[in-house]
Amino acid sequence: MLLSILVISRTEDLLSQMLSSISKATCLDKENIEILCSWNGSQNNERKIVNHSNYDFKIVQREEYHFAKNINSLAKKASGEILLIINDDIILDPQSIDNGIEALKTKKNIGLVGGNLRYENDLIQHIGISYDKNNYPYHKFENSVAVGNSILRDNSSKLIPSATGALFFIKRELFNEFGFSEKYDISGEDIELCLEIRGKKDLNILFCQNVSGIHFSSKTRKKNNQDFNTLNDLERVKNKRLEFLENASKEQILLDLRDLQEEISIIKDLYIRSKLKNFIKSSLNWIYYKFKSIKF
């Protein structure tokens, strides 16, 4: 079997929506995909799940919600050569699964392939994770730039410091070697996994432009008051980042530097465009009122 799709859910309508999007996201035959679910919801809602994916869907465990523990458990039950870990609140775009598999199998020195996620209003949700001066992670341009903005001129796949756990591809053997750290309260295990893969295997994290979808971000967490990292989570991620920086190869450090330089360049261009836009707007207003005052 080629692919195991792993998903955690407690919300039948989100899960059904995600499952439906799989049918157009891949052309793989049925024998090459399994969808394994860790169900945290009620028995009544479980009966309402609708699977229009055209692939085998199984609820293989019913455990209390903990993202890292649930996914680690699912990964041990998986049969696929490749794992696709995906949130239930994502709608995949067509061909996204096939594109992700191709990238992971054909690109050199890649440990993990991350996706391109947007909000319902087309603003960026995830195109990669960077780190601030305190070594805390953040999503680049989140909720501030439209996905199709020409300022993001390089639309090709690229290496990034880290990727979100909401959508990524990884070989099962590599994932099971590290797994998600189960020491996080809410989130951060995805960041640590990326740092471990880069630091201990010298493998890269690939942002794949055409692995994409709409992310109804953290709807389930918000409903259950789990929308923000705890102090424990933030401090653990920070310490893992510092550990990575102390031991990483020169190539890995340069990768982060190039990523930061590109981000600064884009921010600079956005600022210039904003200033130019305001100048043009004020100039047009001045011309309008100037002509309006002229008597013919």
Image (cartoon, rainbow, N blue to C red):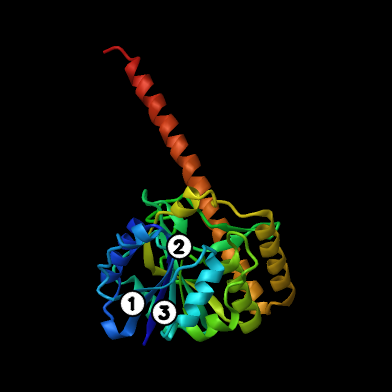
Where is residue 32 shown, x and y percent of the image?
Answer: 32, 84
Q: Tell me if label 1 and label 2 are in contact, CB under 8 Å.
A: no
Which residue is most to the right? 246
User: Residue, x 37% and y 61% (percent of image)?
Assistant: 43
Q: Which residue is mark 2?
A: 40
User: Callout 1: helix, strand or loop?
Assistant: helix
Q: Residue type at mark 2: give it.
A: Asn
Q: Residue 184, can we see it?
A: yes
The image shows residue 287, relative to residue 109, as above or below, that is: above
Q: Which residue is mark 3?
A: 103
- Residue farthest to the front? 43
Question: Between 37 and 255, which is closer to the camera in this rendering?
Answer: 37
Mark 1 highlights which residue?
98
Instruction: Determine crowd level at label 1: few under 14, some 14-19, many 20+ residues with C-alpha closer than 10 A.
Output: some
* First reached walking from the N terminus: tag 2 or tag 3: 2
Mark 3 Cα shell of 10 Å, populated few (<14), some (14-19), many (≥20): many
Comparing labels 2 and 3, the label whose residue is closer to the camera: 2
